[in-house]
Amino acid sequence: MSRRLRILHVIHDFLPRHRAGSEIYAFDLAREQMARHDVFVLAAEYDPAAAHGTLRWRTWGGLAVIEIVNNWEFREFAESYRSPRMNDQLGHALDAVRPDVVHVHSLLNLSFDLPRLARARGASVVATLHDHTLVCPSGGQRVHVAEAHVCAEIDAERCSRCFVESPFYSQMAAGRVTRLHGGRAAGRAALLLRRFAPGAASAAARTIGAGQVSVADIETRITEAAGVFEAVDLFVAPSRSIGAEFIRLGLDPERLEVSDYGFTPVSPRASPVSPRVQGRPLRAGFVGTLVWHKGAHVLIDAAAMPGGAVEVHLHGDTDIFPSYVASLRRRASGLPVTFHGGFDRSAVADVYASFDVLVVPSLWPENSPLVIHEAFMLGVPVIGTRIGGTADLVHDEADGLLVEPASAASLAAGLQRFVSDPSLHARLSAGAPRVKSMADDAAEWDRRYERVRPVRMAAS
């Protein structure tokens, strides 16, 4: 039995407002650990109604959450990843919690200096590699949305173009208005514009300006990210794909362990939907954020191809990226496509029971998508793209099908397999692998924490 520790989970944002995969995983892991440890969460939040850098405490699901307001009121690009104001406030949070272990999920919206600040206070630092935010300043997906480009390489020149077209540049512009002209009203107006008219917000950001972001700025950030590699005692990659990529980017393999996420079990419905039968349209489901790099538009285009007999059911919040959703609605005009919106986590089993196959048409190298694990737990076959962690998880012809990313024709062919052969559903459903439980995952983390603690104590 491991000793009781004070654990601080660090993440770029958190529940209930932010509900993507890394936030859900961090919450579920922290909740599992509460029986044996004292657990806290430190997260950033964008709130122009509050002063930049404000520290505030709240609770969610029984967890103590320290929230630091980051309104991107920066004088220069470098402060987006290392800000004196953020560092001071992060230091206060660390002093208040006095953690034995800091478990980093993301440093976006926080500071590259946080691992160093934690180690200076005697804490061990571990990190889960959920995405590429350390090396991709525009959000960690390594996609240049404006140019519809997936970045196989980190290209500083492309990054500098991409960043000024990203929501983060708009945030910097709004922060500049607030910082230079004072008052929270201007910041709130910029936030509303960014949420409900993102195109106008981007245009306004370029007009107002948030300072230049040069190739040299990006190159410096990449260099500083390498320093984070040295300040973390142990990294865990949930997929071989993302682990191999970070080694290629300079992470010492001795500091890396590959181990998939754990999950809270999802119980199937008491009365499951009847198996796929010939003659009924195939119900293809999409679950997740409706954003370009997740590829929902490819699914709609695939369903529109001749010979289909496919219904598309999109389950995702339609308000987060309204411009993209508007483009999806135009694409879906006249097609059997239903926008169901977001859903509460208690409805997961019902949502998956409402379709025949989960489609994960991602354009970017996903890490280890939560939705694929949920589908496996509920016996739902998966069609995924042959890229990143999706290709690590889905075994072609065993528990799902793999198709080419960004190819509506390839996806349509996969969907047609299910339309033409009703027995495929049962065969792939029966092949679903066991998914690691969150209890097992938490036990593994206990062993890792104990392993790195002596290293830190000896170095202190």
Image (cartoon, grey):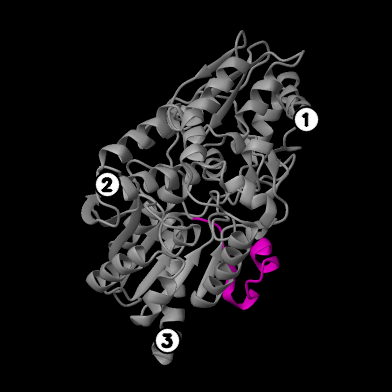
Please state which of residues 330 and 380 is positioned toward the viewer in this rendering: 330
Q: Gap in Å between the C-alphas at discs 1 and 3?
A: 51 Å
Residue 80: x and y, percent? 46, 57
Considering the numbered disc 1 on the image, is that residue within a helix, a strand or a loop?
helix
**Extreme top residue here?**
334
**Quadrant of the image occupied by residue 259:** bottom right
Closer to the chain start, of discs 1 and 3, is 1
Please state which of residues 248 and 82 is positioned toward the viewer in this rendering: 82
Based on the picture, tell me whether residue 253 belongs to the magenta stretch.
yes
Camera-side mark, 3 or 2: 2
In the image, which residues are magenta?
243-261
Q: Looking at numbered disc 2 in the image, what kind of residue is underneath it?
A: Gly
**Quadrant of the image occupied by residue 84:** bottom left
> At x 72% / y 55%, what residue is drawn?
153
Q: Which residue was labeled with disc 3?
A: 454
Residue 384 vs 159, above or below: the answer is above
Q: Which residue was labeled with disc 1?
A: 410
Residue 182, disc: 2
Which quarter of the image is occupied by the C terminus? bottom left
Residue 244: x and y, percent? 68, 63
